[in-house]
Amino acid sequence: MGGLLLGLVVTAALVGGGGWAIQQALGAAQPPAGQKLWIALGAMAAVGLVTGLVVAGRVSPLATFLPSMALLAWTVVYALDMNRALSYIPAEPSVNEIVREAGQGARMLLTSGVFALLGVALFIPVLIPSRWARRYDDDDDDEYEESRQGGYY
């Protein structure tokens, strides 16, 4: 359950946070850059930190599998039917401005292939067999050894 929740957080961070940050950074690229650019760069660094910790850490393989499949599936839909893939991005005026900005940034990340790149990078840890192995605590080892003492040798 923890891996699934972490996977949802990573997916939201990549699509929402990454999209918003890239949109803000591109909007603030005109001089004078100022505080808006620093906030966008900080948001990008936070998204990168969350993604890096999930990829490098010993967490459930679902934490990288879920976002990788979402990003790769969206990229495949974009390659097969561009209009359908772009219709998933909220762009109506009735949507909150922050959500619209995140959607515009996600559109840039999708159309430029960044989501495909991130999807493949997040899928690689799923292929590592040690991610799927059960982790044993020291307490589990003690219980096992105690039960073996009374056995037949």
Image (tube, rainbow, N blue to C red):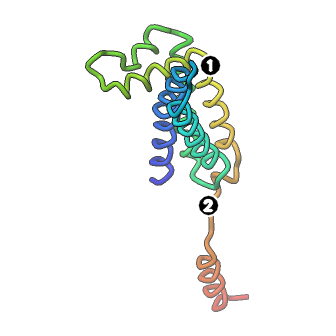
As shown in the figure, which amino acid type bears the numbered disc 1? Gly
Q: Position of residue 31 (x, y in %)?
A: 58, 20
> What residue appears at the point 60 percent right and 45 percent down from the top-left corner?
49
Q: Residue furthest right?
A: 153
Q: Position of residue 18 (x, y in %)?
A: 53, 31
Per the image, the residue denoted by label 1 is 113
**Left or right: where 116 falls relative to 74:** right
Whole-number angstrom distance, CA of label 2 to CA of label 1: 35 Å
Q: Secondary structure at mark 1?
A: loop
Q: Is residue 95 above or below residue 129?
A: above
Q: Nearer the viewer, residue 135 or 150?
A: 135
Which of the 4 image quadrants contains residue 37? Answer: top right
Q: Residues within 10 Å of mark 1 (few under 14, many from 20)?
A: few
As shown in the figure, which amino acid type bears the numbered disc 2? Arg
Q: Is residue 8 above or below residue 25?
A: below
How many numbered markers are drawn? 2
Q: Nearer the viewer, residue 148 or 16?
A: 16
Q: Position of residue 141 (x, y in %)?
A: 64, 78
Placement of the C terminus among the 4 image quadrants: bottom right
Q: Nearer the viewer, residue 86 or 147?
A: 86
> What residue appears at the point 63 percent right and 91 percent down from the top-left corner?
150
Q: Residues within 10 Å of mark 2 (few under 14, many from 20)?
A: few
**Left or right: where 20 falls relative to 122:** left
> What residue appears at the point 54 percent right and 31 percent down from the top-left corner?
34
Q: Is residue 106 above or below residue 44?
A: above
Q: Nearer the viewer, residue 27 or 136?
A: 27
Q: Position of residue 86 (x, y in %)?
A: 45, 14
Per the image, the residue denoted by label 2 is 134
